[in-house]
Image (cartoon, helix red, strand yellow):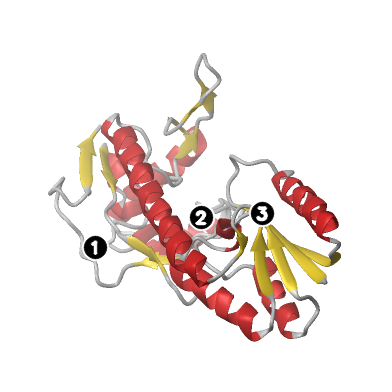
Amino acid sequence: MKVALYARYSSDNQRDTSIEDQFRICRGYADTQGWTIVDSYGDRVISGGSLIRPGIQDVIADANKGRFQILLTEAMDRLSRDQEDIAGLFKRMNFASVKIVTLSEGEINHLHIGLTATMNALYLKELANKTRRGLRGRVELGKSGGGLCYGYDVVKQRDIHGEVICGERAINDRQTQIVRRIFREYADGKSPKSIALSLNTEGHHGPLSGAWSPSTINGNRERGTGILNNELYIGRLIWNRLHYIKNPSTGKRVRNPFSTACGPDDGSGTLQRIL
């Protein structure tokens, strides 16, 4: 039997060698079964919440070409944690006459798809809730809830036990001068377009080390984007103003078009803090 191996890891908390570790134990199992390994596919530092991954897409394409009869992986959640995606992958493999076998669950059947996929989806939801709770705790302490703000640097520190201290930031003196200049020139009647042009002419890099644009300065008042609308510059730390959700078609996080901005700590998760 011809078999293909698949491995994935999703975060920096895992080592890059995690992929090789998964391949190693899968190779050992394939050898005991007398299977011939035709290829190995992997996705590094990519979430399992979507099938928009180069490795898994190559698996699907090669399965349809008849390159292998078995897809072997460490566990079903390596393939996907999303119920719809894992069910769709299972259907695609069935159509290509490919069996899915994992070291944890054995040969995957419809029962696995129903039960295990549900547990994986619940795991993702609980993980999101724990992450949100941790971020809120940081913000309540006046620390950063995530994201990089122009004028500040992320401070990487560890406590006495070697654990990473998250949310610390420090003022970037060079960028601070640019921020003050933008506010001063705007107050004097200069347009965002004119300010951006002068900053670019003088060779100053923007927030993402690229060129300044009028939208970078002016932004969107409702969404609180842009230098002029960032309330952190007046000592007000606002967290969770916008609600983002993963687009099922692209696998990318986008702003939820059906959500609305909320007031200060109205119980919805939005939190404002005066520093």
Residue 46 vs residue 218, the one in the foreground: 46
Which is nearer the N-term, disc 1 or disc 2?
A: 2
- Mark on residue 78? none
Query: Which residue is tagged 2?
Result: 199
Residue 233's x, y, as percent? 31, 41
* Labels 1 and 2 touching (C-beta < 8 A): no
Label 1: element kind: loop
Residue 141's x, y, as percent? 29, 29
Give the left or right position of residue 180, taking residue 13 as reference: left
- Which residue is pictured at 44% across the width and 47% down the height? 147
Place residue 74 in its image quadrant: bottom right
Query: Which residue is tagged 3?
Result: 103
| Disc 3 crowd, CA 10 A, few/some/many (<14, 14-19, 20+) | some
Give the left or right position of residue 94, taking residue 248 as reference: right
Distance from Cα at disc 3 to Cα at disc 2: 57 Å
Residue 112's x, y, as percent? 51, 64
* Labels 3 and 1 touching (C-beta < 8 A): no
What's the amino acid at mark 3?
Leu
Residue 45 vs residue 174, the one in the foreground: 45
- Mark on residue 222? 1
Task: Note whether residue 130 is visible.
Answer: yes
What's the amino acid at mark 1?
Glu
Give the left or right position of residue 272, taking residue 11 as reference: left
Which is nearer the N-term, disc 3 or disc 2?
A: 3
Q: Quadrant of the C terminus?
A: top left
Q: Seen from this angle, which residue lies furthest top?
A: 160
Task: Note whether residue 195 is visible.
Answer: no
- Which residue is pictured at 76% across the width and 76% down the height? 69
Residue 217 vs residue 6, the one in the foreground: 6
- Which residue is pictured at 33% across the width and 48% down the height? 183
